[in-house]
Amino acid sequence: MPTVEAQPSAFTFAPDSAALLVIDMQRDFLEPGGFGESLGNDVTQLRRTIAPLAAFMTRWRAAGLPVIHTREGHLPDLSDCPPAKLARGAPSKRIGDPGAFGRILIRGEHGHDIIDELRPAPGEAVVDKPGKGAFYATGLQQLLDELGIRSLLVAGVTTEVCVHTTVREANDRGYECLVLADCVGSYFPEFQRVGLDMIAAQGGIFGWVADSTSVHL
Ligand code: C5J
């Protein structure tokens, strides 16, 4: 069983019950000119995760292990978007409004899809989620049960929002989560640092943290 040197302690997982969970690597969040950048965010802070994650995905797939992707977004009629979420954000740059890559965070739009560099391989699961967490109103729990998954290696964006929410939800459901520090990103460097510290604090209050290069398969 691989053992990873991680914070706050070694993380051991059984490959036959582990999955790589890639959170929301979508054009709307990562592409220059897209929704994330239009809100004033520095997308380079997220884009630095692409190369290490692509390299790790290649190794993970070569070992025959499952990758599960998620996308945050909503139905075109917005019926799955709570009014409180819809009302958030700058007027004219809200969910469902026209953006550079189609309607912002709407399923089926160009911007909602995963960036070309990390396109899901044929047969890999893509979980569409209306919330920040990947368990709320999705089939993720059932999918993990069917695959017999107990450990999750977690990558994606953003560290303090959808990655945190999902890892906290997974931890409460009994999964052991290793967050790959070089493969998760925040628009805000201080949130990245503190977000990772929070996971591993207090003896690993809801997970473990290590760089992807520390995972030897
Ligand atoms: C946000 C996400 N930040 N994927 N979504 O709204 O973290």
Image: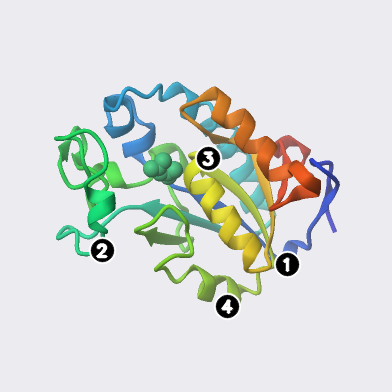
Q: Nearer the viewer, mark 3 or mark 1?
A: 3
Query: Which residue in the structure is indicated by mark 4?
Result: 146
- Label 2 and label 3: CA atoms lie apart by 23 Å
Q: Please report whichever mark, 1 or 2, sits nearer to the chain's N-terminal start.
A: 1
Q: Of circles 1 and 2, which is in front?
A: 2
| Mark 4 secondary-structure assignment | helix
What is the distance, in whole Å, between disc 4 and disc 2 at their CAs?
Answer: 26 Å
Asked if the beta carbon under badge 1 is closer than 8 A to the nearest atom of ligand 1, the reply is no
Which of the numbered marks, if any, corresponds to residue 80? Answer: 2
Circle 1 is placed at which residue position? 16
Point out residue 17 in the picture as x, y percentages from the top left corner. Answer: 71, 67
Q: Is mark 3 within 8 Å of ligand 1?
A: yes
Quarter the N terminus occupies: bottom right
- Residue contact at pointers 4 and 1, CB within 8 angstroms: no
Q: Can the viewer see residue 79 in this picture?
A: yes
**Is 202 positioned to the left or the right of 94 in the image?**
right
Mark before the other along the chain sequence, 4 or 2 = 2
User: How far is disc 4 from disc 1 in space, using C-alphas?
Assistant: 13 Å
Q: Nearer the viewer, residue 170 or 115?
A: 170
Q: Amino acid at mark 3?
A: Glu
